[in-house]
Amino acid sequence: MSGSLPPTRLGAVPDFELERFFDRFEFDLPYQLGSSDPQTLGLGELLAYADERQRQRWATLRLGYRTAAGDPDLRAAIAGLYPGRTSEDVLVAVGAAEALMLTFAASLAPGDRAIALTPAYQSLHEMPRAMGADLELVPVERAGGGWRFPFERLMDALRPGITALVLNTPHNPTGVAASAEQLATILRRCEDAGIRVIGDEVYRGLEWALPTPPSVTGLSDRAVAVGVTSKVYGLAGLRIGWLVTGDTDLRRRAMAIKDYTTLCAAGPSEVLATIAVSAHTALRDRTRALCEANMDALDAFVAARPDLVAWRRPAATTISVARIAAPLLARHGGDADAVLASWRGRAGVVVVPGPAFGCAADEFRLGFGRTDLPAAIQALSGAG
Ligand SMILES: Cc1ncc(COP(=O)(O)O)c(C=O)c1O
């Protein structure tokens, strides 16, 4: 943050490190191996999933304002992903980014106490703080060269007097995830202690080492589940996200705030998102197949080149935190930034430096949802 403007409430938020990094490197270099959004579909590919009514809606779409709560077909399709919830419980937003912002703005006040995991997608820390909440951070645990969901520590932190638990599971950037049993226990504790659970579930459906657990909104009426088309369907550019909750007051308040942020989502995006959400299983399975093939390729790569990268398959998500192997780091005089710069310069490969997430300098976020991952790791091998 810079310039001569006086501080303002939201103007005081720290820079979003990940976005500032992507500003520099996301669009100019060929291999995006740090991104969390999997390979996107082209418009024609997505339309191939549409049924007759959806094709008609797309062909005859008019480009006026839309309803603030979200397109009725889209809300119904989203509600279908959450057993026990109806369209009424859904508020469409512009990305998970806005859904989170609306949720925090609607539910947190100065002096509230909230719990969140660390490391984290930065808005899960900065938006609660911007609303005036005090944040207590529970670290995701390191275990055997990988990461572990910090269930016991989280349970210890859930005491009466806490307003909200901001629970990102499956988790960015480590790829850990709470099991169904852990989630049920956490939600029960939160119910008993009067703690609202705000579940960032944008990677739900992309579990590798466990079955997909239920959404938090299926476990508690007060809980809020946030989802998006960006990750599971690879449709980040639609900028369609949502919040789902049985708490009518919170949803109404979030909608009232939305009148001052985006008012409504873009019509073309809503119609396209309806097609995507209606084709949930097919699109999710497409992403899953791509990620699983890429994780196999990464396993083979790190087995063949242990001098370059240390990496463990995560339990879930499209990303994980990997480490620059000691021999490679030593060749660059222990300078992790120099290694990542050489990957960009010599191989055209972009990964996200660990410090952008509060991880160590020799760690980096590695994404495995893009079709060119095999070519990218080939280029990395050559760059050394
Ligand atoms: C955990 C998490 N929450 C929310 C978001 C925001 O999603 P979107 O940019 O699609 O709004 C992301 C994006 O990377 C994320 O990883």
Image (tube, grey):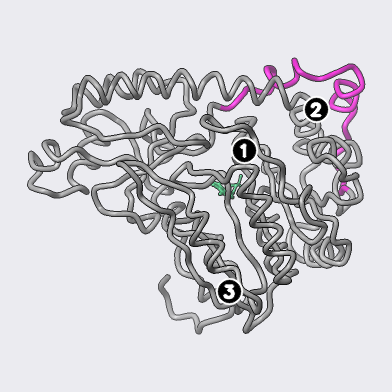
**Placement of the C terminus among the 4 image quadrants:** top left
N-terminal-most mark, 1 or 2: 1
- Categorize mark 1 by other alpha carbons within 10 Å: few (<14), some (14-19), many (20+): many
Q: Amino acid at mark 3?
A: Ala
**Where is residue 6 shown, x and y percent of the image?**
50, 84
Q: Are marks 3 and 1 in contact (CB under 8 Å)?
A: no
Q: CA distance from mark 1 to mark 2?
A: 15 Å
User: Label 2, on which residue?
Assistant: 278
Q: Is residue 223 above or below residue 158?
A: above
Ligand 1 within 8 A of label 1's CB? yes
Q: Quadrant of residue 252?
A: bottom right
- Categorize mark 3 by other alpha carbons within 10 Å: few (<14), some (14-19), many (20+): many
Ligand 1 within 8 A of label 2's CB? no
Q: Are marks 1 and 2 in contact (CB under 8 Å)?
A: no
Q: Are marks 3 and 2 in contact (CB under 8 Å)?
A: no
User: Label 3, on which residue?
Assistant: 130
Q: Secondary structure at mark 3?
A: helix
Q: Which residues are magenta?
A: 40-66
User: Label 1, on which residue?
Assistant: 230
Q: Amino acid at mark 1?
A: Ser
